[in-house]
Image: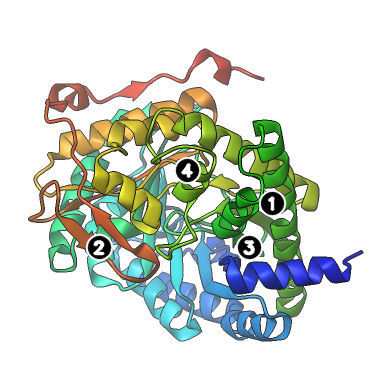
Amino acid sequence: MINQNDILSTIRMIDQQHLDIRTITMGISLLDCCDSDPKRACEKIYDKITRSARDLVKTGEAIEAEFGIPIVNKRISVTPIALIAGASDTEDYVPFAAALDKARAETGVNFVGGFSALVQKGMTPADEKLIRAIPEALATTELVCASVNIGSTKAGINMDAVGKMGRVIKETAALTADRGGLGCAKLVVFCNAVEDNPFMAGAFHGVSEADRVINVGVSGPGVVYHALQSIKGQPFDVVAETIKKTAFHVTRMGQLVAREASRRLDTPFGIVDLSLAPTPAVGDSVARILEEMGLEVCGAHGTTAALALLNDAVKKGGVMASSSVGGLSGAFIPVSEDEGMIAAAQSGVLTLDKLEAMTCVCSVGLDMIAVPGDTPAETLAAIIADEAAIGMVNTKTTAVRLIPAPGMQVGDTVDFGGLLGSAPVMPVHTESAAAFIARGGRIPAPMHSLKN
């Protein structure tokens, strides 16, 4: 039963602490859109998306107005396009991205994700065509997002795909150089990608999902930060309990919105993803939460331990509030989207190596990190391989979203605007990994993958 204190507390969280529903994402299966004629397949994709999501934005706005809960984004995720386009007799998959973008514009949603391929164990001709198409697709569409899953705990790491993605990131940056390499901000490379992630740029609609589904992503770094301010100097047991209770309240709000959106759209409810997804706004930072625990600057010794506590407590509190918590629930650490992370990186305390260590215990990986524009493709691929190894061995999702900012060097700042924020260009190791990446093949799955 929700009492008056709960209502007043939630109002305070929304008005003063940046609490919001970060996204309502409708997942749409496109498996019935396969066609040997690529033009006809694109028409089917456009028709199904516009038919399925025609009321998504209107419904989100109505819930926002009636409940007084900010809903920042309305998004669409679709079946990995490599699975759909593979049935078509064509070498060019860019028109499929154009169809997604056209449908996005018609429905009015903020992003559409799913220009994706799953190649953790090997690549089909369709997967290779899609990967080749990514740079042009992201350069010529406005709000289409792409992702490639190159590894998993069960399959190991596809190093041929890792090498390709290093080159794809470089080409994408070059084709969007006039926008600071913005195309790379719409491209994620995964290990252990999940099928019900509502967050961009990595969302896609898994083949095991229903024909349509509603997934909701909730965010509340500011709420957690304010809660910790009231327990200064208290032991970590108290810190963990405080975060759990806060996460519970936040998830309850997400559950309410998800159920209501599901009912109004006559679409099955999937999951609530309780991820502390920051924004560039002051007071909405994961880094500031870690500093509130006692660190002088995010990135100092102790940061990984603080993040581990935060991530675990968020999940424990969320699970108690909903039986359908999923996606990537935990804490995100996207550098460009977190004002505290930006400040720590600019000061030189938060380094790429420290961020890599932090990804062992957070909910995703190296996210929205700008590196010098002349960084070799092999170095980008090696960073992807390192992050995939963390995900593979630890049976967790890891991801890489790197932006080799064209023409920029360490100390420069690339500005994307909006939720994407601005990123200080961070240094990478200059020693070559070219011979390592050139080996190709597959890094075998770890022994603990044999669980059958």
**Tag 3: residue type?**
Val
**Mark 4 secondary-structure assignment:** helix
Residue 401: image location, x then y, percent: 33, 48
**Tag 4: residue type?**
Glu
Residue at mark 4 to residue at mark 1: CA–CA distance? 19 Å
Q: Which residue is mark 4?
A: 291
Q: Nearer the viewer, mark 2 or mark 4?
A: 4
**Quadrant in the picture for the C terminus:** top right
Residue 88: image location, x then y, percent: 38, 61
Q: Earlier in the sequence, mark 4 or mark 3?
A: 3
Q: Which residue is mark 3?
A: 216
Q: Nearer the viewer, mark 2 or mark 1?
A: 1
Residue at mark 2 to residue at mark 3: CA–CA distance? 25 Å
**Mark 3 secondary-structure assignment:** strand
Q: Marks 1 and 4: in contact by CB < 8 Å?
A: no
Comparing 74 with 133, the one in front is 74
Q: Which mark is residue 247?
A: 1
Rendered residue at 57%/82% (across/down): 57
Q: Which residue is mark 2?
A: 182
Q: Marks 1 and 2: in contact by CB < 8 Å?
A: no
Residue 187: image location, x then y, percent: 33, 54
